Image (tube, helix red, strand yellow):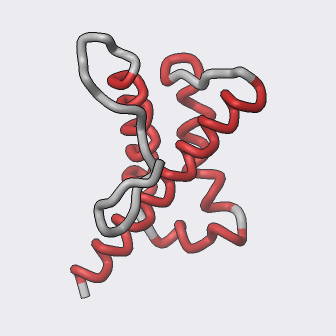
Amino acid sequence: EQAEHLNAQFGAVRFVYSKSLHIKKHAYQRHGVSLTPRKDIKPLLAVAKKFRKFRKYAWLKEYDSIALQQAVINLDVAFSNCFNPKLKARFPMFKRKHGKLLG
């Protein structure tokens, strides 16, 4: 039972990470706006909270909000690492359940 709950929690975190990546890419492609952690951290963190309010995403209420917010923070760290010339990090990718990433 606990393993099932943890798997579902990980799924919710993956969903929020990938949805946040979509929003961040969309904002840049559509409006030329790069959402940054220091400047736009509140709207990015609000993404996780807003998802929980929509009926379509009501299932996220069952999961830890701190873990969902941390997924957004992790995405911002991934972007920071990607654009740091000292690191050889790749562009953040959409997460999948079985470890393969989607570009």
Query: Residue 34, located in which quarter of the rendered image?
Result: top right
Q: Is residue 41 above or below residue 63?
A: above
The residue located at (76%, 31%) in the rendering is: 30
Hey, which residue is sitting farthest bottom in the picture?
A: 1
Task: List x then y, in percent, for residue 9.
Answer: 36, 68
Q: Quadrant of residue 1?
A: bottom left
Query: Residue, x 68% and y 61% (percent of image)?
Result: 53
Position of residue 60 measured from the top left corner of the image (x, y, whole percent): 53, 67
Q: Residue at x 45, y 55 (%)?
A: 65
Q: Residue 69 vs residue 2: left or right? A: right
Residue placed most toward the observer, 58 or 91: 91
| Rendering coords of residue 5 (x, y %) | 32, 78
At x 60%, y 42%, the residue is 46
Q: Position of residue 74 (x, y in %)?
A: 37, 38
As drawn, 48 above or below 82: below
Residue 96 lies, with reference to residue 86, above or below; the image says below
Taking the image as shown, residue 83 lies to the left or right of residue 39, namely: left
Q: How many marks?
A: 0
